[in-house]
Image (tube, rainbow, N blue to C red):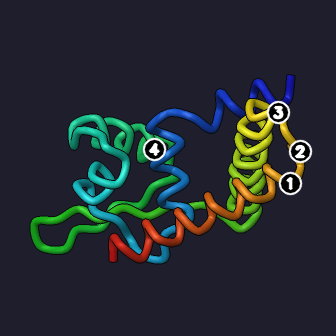
Amino acid sequence: MQSFLISHLAEGLQLQILRGLLTSRRPRHLRELARDYNASPAGVSDVLDRLKKAAVLVEQRRGNRRLFSLRVGEQERECLHKLFREYELQRVRHRAKRLNKHPEKIAARLQDMDEMYAFYRKTKNR
């Protein structure tokens, strides 16, 4: 049950954006988020509006640009990190089971590869 809930909660554009804002060290622009998640600016704008209405998002204006960052306390931030960490581990385990050979070794390798790829994407986008 837990794995089902985590996999369904941690997917989708809203949670991808939430995760991106959580891990970002600076406020993010709408078009930047749209590009990072292969989504339309209108779709990202809808998600950002929902997050703003839920009072977890801060919007700043710099010129004609709107920049967004999360407004969450340390406890909420830690909970979100745990949710996303568990989701990633679950995703890696699922991929390893599909390969059906040495799932623990493969899971560790896949997790390493995913972390390297995520680091590459972050440095590439800067």
Q: Give percent across and percent down for residue 117.
A: 53, 63
Measured in 3D between alpha carbons, the distance from the residue under mark 3 to the one under mark 2, in whole angstroms, is 7 Å
**Quarter of the image that includes the C terminus:** bottom left
Marks 1 and 2 close (CB-CB < 8 Å): yes
Q: Amino acid at mark 2?
A: His
**Which is more toward the observer, 68 or 19?**
19
User: According to the image, label 1 marks what residue?
Assistant: 105
**Quarter of the image that includes the N terminus:** top right
Circle 2 crowding by C-alpha within 10 Å: few under 14, some 14–19, many from 20: few
Q: Amino acid at mark 1?
A: Lys
Q: How many marks?
A: 4
Left or right position of 69 against 64? right
- Pair 4/3: label in front: 3
Q: Of marks 4 and 3, which one's residue comes earlier in the chain?
A: 4
**Which is more toward the observer, 61 or 109?**
109
Q: Amino acid at mark 3?
A: Asn
Checking the image for residue 100, the label placed there is: 3
Measured in 3D between alpha carbons, the distance from the residue under mark 1 to the one under mark 4, in whole angstroms, is 38 Å
**Which residue corresponds to the image point at 58% horizontal and 68% vertical from the top-left?**
116
Q: Is residue 49 above or below residue 7?
A: below
Measured in 3D between alpha carbons, the distance from the residue under mark 1 to the one under mark 3, in whole angstroms, is 11 Å
Measured in 3D between alpha carbons, the distance from the residue under mark 4 to the one under mark 2, in whole angstroms, is 41 Å
Checking the image for residue 102, the label placed there is: 2
Q: Give percent across and percent down for residue 125.
A: 33, 70
Left or right position of 107 against 104? left
Q: Is residue 78 above or below residue 91?
A: below
Q: Amino acid at mark 4?
A: Leu
User: According to the image, label 4 marks what residue?
Assistant: 51
